[in-house]
Amino acid sequence: RAASMTAPNPNAQADLLVKAWEMSQVDPATITYMEAHGTGTALGDPIEITGLKKAFTRLYAKAGKALPAEPHCGIGSVKSNLGHLERASGIAGMLKVLLAMKHRTLPASINIIEVNPYIKLEGTPFQIVRQTRPWAVPLGADGKPVPRRAGVSSFGMGGVNGHVVLEEYLPAEPEAEPITSPEPQLFVLSAKGEEPLRHQAENLARFLEEPAGDALIPLEPPAAGPTEEVRALAASVLGLDIGDLDLEEPLSELGFEVETYTRFQQELGERFALAPGRVSQYATLAGLAAEIGAGPGADGPATRASSVDLRRVAYTLQVGREPYPHRLAVAAGGASELAARLRAFAAGELPPGAWSGLVRGGKKAKESIPGESQVRAALASGRP
């Protein structure tokens, strides 16, 4: 029982956290952020932290692990940025975490001048996120990367107590099949005006030409090969002599723990402008160093044009959009070809394999716009 209608209960909060995370069936060591309700009161904040500490102690015990003394889980509250939002506080906290996952960044809890002296975080897995920082990819018990995971708490009067578990969405591995379609696909765009239509084409071309996934071009590729520098960074983080690290030994066997792996990712990001998610794509230090040393390369970084599924894009554009009068149809058998034709149209040209025109009230106007049968016939005959 709580002392009053407005007083929080740490035991009830801990019980709910344990139940929520047990239902999620995840290793507590992979929980790397908790969005607290953050009452902002002298009594409420220490009680919420006490509930978190009790919950994690029980979760680690149930997992057969000792509670780590080094922090791996950030704590923050959107209230420090926005103030009290009453009934909207829970959804605001959840939206904050979803955006943090999208941008792979933990935003700072601002306006913290002095921490409540009754909040004790020493010897716990928690640390207050006081500066915006990259949200590092956590490692599972097998040393392999796992999705980012976070919890969001929201309280009300009279014991109302909610907690949501969130996990980053990771797309399934792409099917092992050629990305280039076996036959040309038809991509349709429409807009309310000719100029907006050209902007639509330019935006789609830009999307196809963007770096894929976490790919980043190093800001300042080092003049010499980065192999020794990467090994030196790893040795420094692990507290080892540089000669003790085998470049060909799997990263999972070098002795990284959650904290040291996170710090290694952060230092690589600062030195080579490498996104944290890229580190986990390489099995060894040698592979990682080779990627960094390659720099932008002759063909530039991998783009979405090398991995996008044209059939899905074409289908979505055909059935998932409300058609407007100014229309464009582009036939292409590959993403690079599609991007090139879209760029040409955006520049004021009408390239081969593209058709454009204006429709009013379902009637033809200004230019003749071929119907589906005409377009398919043109594709079959090879005519532009």
Image (cartoon, rainbow, N blue to C red):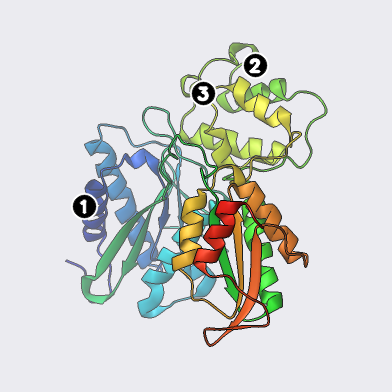
Q: Nearer the viewer, residue 104 or 266?
A: 104
- Vertical placement of residue 282 versus 106, above or below: above
List the residue tagged with mark 1.
19
Q: Amino acid at mark 1?
A: Lys
Give the mark, 1 or 2, whose residue is nearer the N terminus.
1
Vertical position of residue 81 compared to residue 146: above or below? below
Image coords of residue 339 (percent x, y): 66, 54
Are the residues at dot 1 and dot 3 in contact (C-beta closer than 8 Å)?
Answer: no
Amino acid at circle 2:
Ile
| Secondary structure category for the residue under label 2 | helix
Residue lying furthest bottom in this view? Answer: 361
- Around disc 2, counting alpha carbons within 10 Å, would you say few (fewer than 14), some (14 to 19), or many (20 or more)? some
Spatial separation of the CA atoms under disc 1 and disc 2: 44 Å
Q: Position of residue 152 (x, y in %)?
A: 37, 60
Could you tell me which residue is drawn at 57 percent across and 55 percent down?
A: 379
Is disc 3 surrounded by few (<14), some (14 to 19) or many (20+) residues within 10 Å? Answer: many
Mark 2 vs mark 3: give the one in front: 3
Secondary element type, mark 1: helix
Q: Which residue is mark 2?
A: 242
- Disc number lying in front (1 or 3): 3
Mark 3 or mark 2, which is nearer the start of the sequence?
2
What residue is at 71 percent from the left and 20 percent from the top?
228
Number of callouts: 3
Tell me which numbered mark, 1 or 3, is placed earlier along the sequence.
1
**Foreground: 33 or 223?**
223
Quadrant occupied by the C terminus? bottom right
Q: Residue at x 56, y 24 (%)?
A: 238
Q: Residues within 10 Å of mark 1 (few under 14, many from 20)?
A: few
Tell me: 345 left or right of 75.
right
Label for residue 251? 3
